[in-house]
Amino acid sequence: MFKILDRYIFYLFFKTTFSTLCMLVSFSSIVKFIDRIRQIQNFSLSLLDIAYLTILSLPKEIEELFPIVILISTLWSIGILEINKETIAIELSGISRTQISASILKSIFVFLLIYIFIIEWIIPKNQKIEYYYLYSKNKNSQILKRNNLWIKNKNHFIFIYDTLYFDSLSKINIYTLNSNNQIEEIYYINHAFYKDKKWILYKVKKIKIFENKIIESKKFDKIFWNTDLVPKTIQSIAFPPETLSIINLYNYIYYLKNNAQVYKKYQIIFWNKLFSPLFIFIIMLTILRIVFGKLYYYNIKIKILFGISLGFIFYFLNNICNSITIIYPIPTSLGVFIPAFILIGINLIIKKKIHV
């Protein structure tokens, strides 16, 4: 009987989730499509190009809307069960409210696995496709200029003009600083390729500086540069941190640490990405405990209002804690987990006071 309930609730949850996702993602995509049309004069893009880019951005839209989709779908599914008096029939058949909650959580878990797949593999891949597509359409436009990069690597400051392929760069300037933070060498490089774990620099002009005067100038057809700056790191710098996979984000944070750069913001994004499925699961567990516990005999409208309110409270609390963690010397792991700890505390209190 319990397996039948699992299948039925999963089917119901799938329908509500799919419907909610389609509605919210469609609305969000239409808004972004219209916004991109307004920018069409700035870039060499047609309406078909904008439509293609909008489709590429769908996985990112799903990631951003996923928590609210799961929240609405859960409350919607519970509403359907209660309006049709199915919860009463299920309980009369000998299945407890705890088992009903467990069936809903199993369905949520399946969608969380899909969510993890999207944020870890689909979004980074689509970001690359979008990047190269925009480059091909706007080689001489402001889009390319916007992606010019400044990178700090130990005692080097590197400027990269063209970052089309991250293992093939062009128009690079490397400024080497001494222990007094004064420029002692400048390299002007026409193009560079990454091969066999090192950079090969072509058409290089090297200038040595002492006391703000050029004391030596040399030219090289080709030189090798051994550095820990790899193509994946350059890619991580070029793309918004929110679009990076968890692994690439971790590697980039490690690079920033080794080069004595600020990395707290990226750590917060990393922890949020890594534990966002767990946070969603905890929110849903809290809502189900209260909806099938203290609020069980209340009107479904009150339950829906409570569930949505709790979701938004967690969202705002999470944003506040993230901001406080950046400003004040609070460990990022602690700052990110504060909202989750509060919900876990609520769950423990509910578990003691009521039996679900």
Image (cartoon, rainbow, N blue to C red):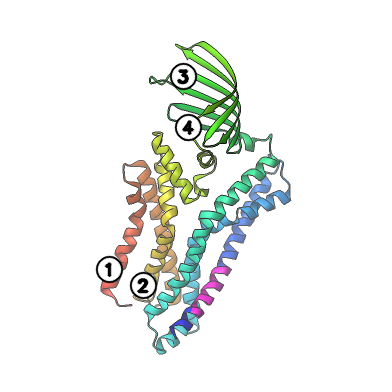
- Is 86 inside the magenta-drawn segment? no
How far apart in space, not on screen, are marks 4 and 2 (Cα)?
53 Å
- The residue that disc 2 covers is 289
> What x and y, as percent, mark residue 293?
35, 76
How far apart in space, not on screen, are marks 4 and 1 (Cα)?
54 Å
> What x and y, as percent, mark residue 206?
54, 18
**Cβ–Cβ under 8 Å for marks 3 and 1:** no
How far apart in space, not on screen, are marks 2 and 1 (Cα)?
11 Å
How far apart in space, not on screen, are marks 3 and 4 (Cα)?
19 Å
- The residue that disc 4 covers is 227
Instruction: Point out the frontmost of discs 3 and 4.
Output: 4
Q: Secondary structure at mark 2?
A: helix
- The residue that disc 3 covers is 183
**Cβ–Cβ under 8 Å for marks 2 and 1:** no
Left or right of 338 on screen, residue 193: right
Q: Which residues are magenta?
A: 7-19
Q: Secondary structure at mark 3?
A: strand
Q: Is residue 163 above or below residue 68?
A: above
Few, some or many C-alpha atoms within 10 Å of disc 4 (few <14, some 14-19, many ≥20)? few
Q: Residue at x 41, y 57 (%)?
A: 275
Sequence-wise, which precedes: disc 2 or disc 3?
3
- Which residue is most to the front? 196
Task: Specify the quadrant that holds the N terminus.
Answer: bottom left
> What x and y, as percent, mark residue 54?
64, 53
The residue type indicated by label 4 comes to: Thr
Instruction: Point out the frontmost of discs 4 and 1.
Output: 4
